Amino acid sequence: MIDLLINGQSVAVDAPDDMPLLWALRDIVGLTGTKFGCGIAQCGACTVHLDGQPVRSCVLPIGSIGKRAVTTIEAISKTPAGQRVQKAWLEVDVVQCGYCQSGQVMSAAALIQRTPNPSDADIDMAMSGNVCRCCTYSRIRAAIKQAATGKPEVLQSVVAMPARSAS
């Protein structure tokens, strides 16, 4: 039996030490907001916070967590940064298919927590490990900026004009 602190609650998990946190969260604890993507910590869909830092739960053995606090997407709205990010996500209309979004929100909330007014380079660095199959990266960036500043971000679209015929 392994005792974990998940979303502020002590949870006893009956599983082997080497079980990835992702599977303990989803299959044992019943918190299914954290998603399985690649299983090798490359896509970011499984991102959770461990003592406030974003980590990939698909490769983190539960036996290595100890007394550190795990926060999942189900509880990120209890933090000021999480509230701002989730509000901006909705206002900017980031989500398309939504599969990667819990990991995206978790990474963005950690960024806003540690860097309240991130630059484009800060955003690129913090979000580089999160893959969005729908390519909503411009909306993700806009939502992060809006969460940081509280000001609405204007999305810019690039539209190619059709070529005129020479006749």
Image (cartoon, grey):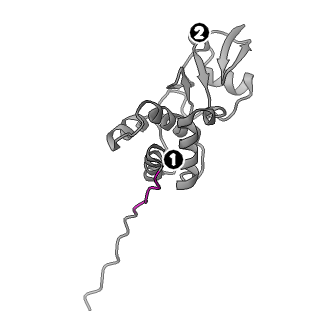
Front position in the image: 83 or 142: 83
Say which element carries label 2. Answer: loop
Decide: is 47 above or below 144: above
First reached walking from the N terminus: tag 2 or tag 1: 2
Q: Is residue 103 visible?
A: no
Residue 32 rendering spot, x and y as whole percentages: 69, 33
Residue 90 rendering spot, x and y as whole percentages: 58, 51
Please tell me whether mark 2 or mark 1 is closer to you in this view.
Answer: 2
Q: Is residue 54 visible?
A: yes
Q: Which mark is residue 66?
A: 2
The segment highlighted magenta reads: 151-156
Dot 1, how many residues are within 10 Å of its Cα: few (below 14), some (14-19), or many (20+)? few
Q: Which mark is residue 133?
A: 1
Residue that protrudes farthest toward the left in the picture:
166
Q: Quadrant of the N terminus?
A: top right
Q: CA distance from mark 2 to mark 1?
A: 34 Å
Q: Amino acid at mark 1?
A: Arg
